Image (tube, grey):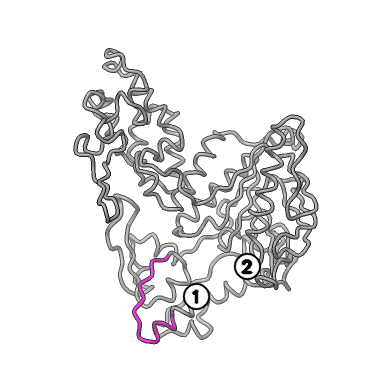
């Protein structure tokens, strides 16, 4: 519907410039400009400009490669979804437009909740599951306190399996320039200790506190460790400029005189993740979270990039890295009885692919699988079919939106979805979607360019066995 509106505006003689990762939008565009080849310092160049075919034939275009060769599912053919006989169950869910549903979500698996807009997905996942289970789990930490009442449902069972409940959303990870990826993920303290252990730092009696930009002593006094100064403009918005004392390096001269392999603590803050990985190769406690940041596609971020400058997608992936860093390399035992005795977390994500490039969606899928393989339960509200194809369990709400929604159209393991729900809207839609991509049919597809749309290999992820 949105594409129809854009095309109608174009047909009336208007010029539309759209910044978008959505594949349908790119395939309908009259002219494409691809910027890259990477992100951050690796980007900034025009890789391709022209038709869809021009983009797909550009050797340096990551976007072109994904358009020409879409993801084949499952991404990891060797991955076996964790087996479970436990479910998080909701009885008589009636919040907002939910029509007195009984819902079961497998514990220890990746569940995707999908459906048309307004069908009740976010109501079920966030307003009902997240809020209630979080309150129930929090109540167990308070002695001699009754359980809180369930809002929007008659009962919820199975929540006792969780010791933590988190929503991983796209809200900022910090509001001040002092907050940055290194401090949020938690490896900045380790870097400060490494510099405090340098020979010159020990000789001067410096401790790790000297290398903190949040406390007085080693930080720049002109900008209070922010690396920038704010100029008040009276009737205009305030302007932030680079600190003219420290040059944006956040620390005073004496602190910057301490170097490690010819780099000061201020230089480290200016490193991007990829560069820092090589620099801290001999320090596993620092290198591991850096590797995780690279794994989720954030290798271009600098360690000291102010949190307010991060996009919603970047902030969300940093939160996921923080959770992966907590898990370490640990995996759940194979014995189901041993699994029950171990604490688990419930993660809820609401449309995490919004704003993500197709390459980043692939990285996100692998992160979600790592969370599940470590024994956690992940619930994702999502329209993206690549996420669908990698789910362990799918719940489709609908059939329409608003008063026409709020019902369970289908719920089943992903591998048996199409076999069990061929007559359902969500069960048959991937097939028609795939066919539409395989051949230019339909009024919108009969374009003058005449390019054919390659099929998308969803069969392996959405059919039985």
Residue that mark 2 sits on? 118
Depicted 206 relative to depicted 265: above or below: above
SS at badge 2 = loop
Hey, which quadrant is residue 118 in on the image?
bottom right
The crowd level at tag 1 (other Cα within 10 Å; few <14, some 14-19, many 20+) is: few
- Mark 2 or mark 1, earlier in chain: 1
Judge by depth and name the residue closer to the eye, 223 or 281: 223
Depicted 285 relative to depicted 304: above or below: above
Magenta residue check for 96: no
Q: Seen in the image, is 365 located left or right of residue 175?
A: right
First to last magenta residue range:
7-20
Report how far apart the C-alphas of labels 2 and 1 lie in the structure: 16 Å
SS at badge 1 = helix
Judge by depth and name the residue closer to the eye, 321 or 46: 321
- Asked whether disc 2 touches disc 1, contact meaning CB atoms under 8 Å apart, the reply is no
Residue that mark 1 sits on? 2
SS assignment for the magenta stretch, majority = loop
Where is residue 18? Give x, y as percent: 38, 70
Where is residue 378? Give x, y as percent: 63, 48
Where is residue 102? Give x, y as percent: 79, 58
Depicted 213 relative to depicted 6: above or below: above
Q: Which residue occupies the extreme front position in the image? A: 234
Q: Nearer the viewer, mark 2 or mark 1?
A: 2
């Amino acid at each position: 519907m949105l594409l129809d509106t854009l095309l109608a505006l174009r047909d009336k003689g208007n010029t539309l410039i759209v910044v978008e990762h959505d594949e349908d939008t790119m395939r309908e565009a009259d002219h494409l400009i691809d910027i890259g080849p990477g992100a951050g310092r690796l980007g900034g160049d025009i890789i391709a400009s022209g038709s869809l075919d021009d983009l797909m034939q550009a050797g340096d275009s990551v976007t072109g490669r994904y358009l020409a060769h879409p993801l084949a599912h499952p991404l990891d053919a060797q991955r076996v979804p964790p087996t479970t006989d436990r479910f998080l169950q909701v009885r008589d869910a009636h919040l907002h437009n939910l029509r007195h549903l009984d819902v079961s979500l497998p514990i220890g698996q990746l569940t995707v909740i999908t459906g048309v807009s307004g069908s009740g997905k976010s109501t079920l996942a966030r307003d009902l599951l997240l809020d209630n289970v979080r309150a129930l789990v929090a109540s167990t930490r308070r002695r001699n306190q009754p359980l809180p009442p369930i809002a929007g449902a008659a009962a919820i069972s199975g929540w006792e399996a969780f010791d933590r409940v988190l929503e991983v959303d796209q809200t900022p990870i910090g509001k001040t320039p002092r907050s940055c990826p290194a401090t949020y993920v938690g490896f900045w303290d380790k870097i400060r200790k490494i510099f405090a252990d340098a020979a010159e730092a020990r000789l001067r009696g410096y401790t790790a506190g000297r290398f903190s930009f949040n406390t007085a002593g080693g930080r720049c006094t002109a900008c209070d460790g922010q690396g920038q100064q704010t100029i008040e403009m009276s009737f205009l918005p305030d302007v932030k400029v680079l600190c003219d004392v420290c040059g944006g390096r956040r620390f005073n001269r004496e602190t910057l005189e301490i170097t490690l392999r010819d780099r000061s603590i201020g230089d480290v803050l200016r490193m991007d993740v990829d560069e820092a990985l090589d620099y801290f190769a001999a320090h596993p406690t620092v290198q591991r979270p850096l590797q995780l940041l690279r794994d989720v596609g954030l290798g271009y971020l600098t360690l000291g990039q102010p949190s307010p400058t991060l996009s919603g997608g970047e902030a969300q992936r940093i939160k996921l890295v923080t959770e992966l860093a907590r898990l370490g390399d640990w995996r759940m035992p194979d014995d189901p009885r041993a699994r029950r005795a171990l604490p688990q977390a419930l993660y809820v994500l609401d449309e995490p692919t919004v704003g993500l490039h197709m390459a980043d969606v692939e990285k996100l899928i692998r992160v979600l699988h790592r969370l599940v393989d470590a024994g956690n339960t992940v619930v994702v509200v999502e329209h993206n079919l690549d996420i669908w194809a990698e789910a362990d369990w799918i719940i489709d709400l609908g059939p329409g939106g608003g008063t026409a929604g709020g019902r369970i159209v289908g719920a089943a393991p992903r591998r048996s979805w199409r076999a069990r729900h061929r007559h359902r809207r969500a069960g048959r839609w991937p097939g028609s979607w795939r066919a539409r991509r395989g051949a230019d049919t339909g009024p919108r597809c009969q374009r003058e360019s005449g390019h054919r749309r390659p099929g998308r290999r969803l069969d392996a992820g959405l059919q039985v066995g």
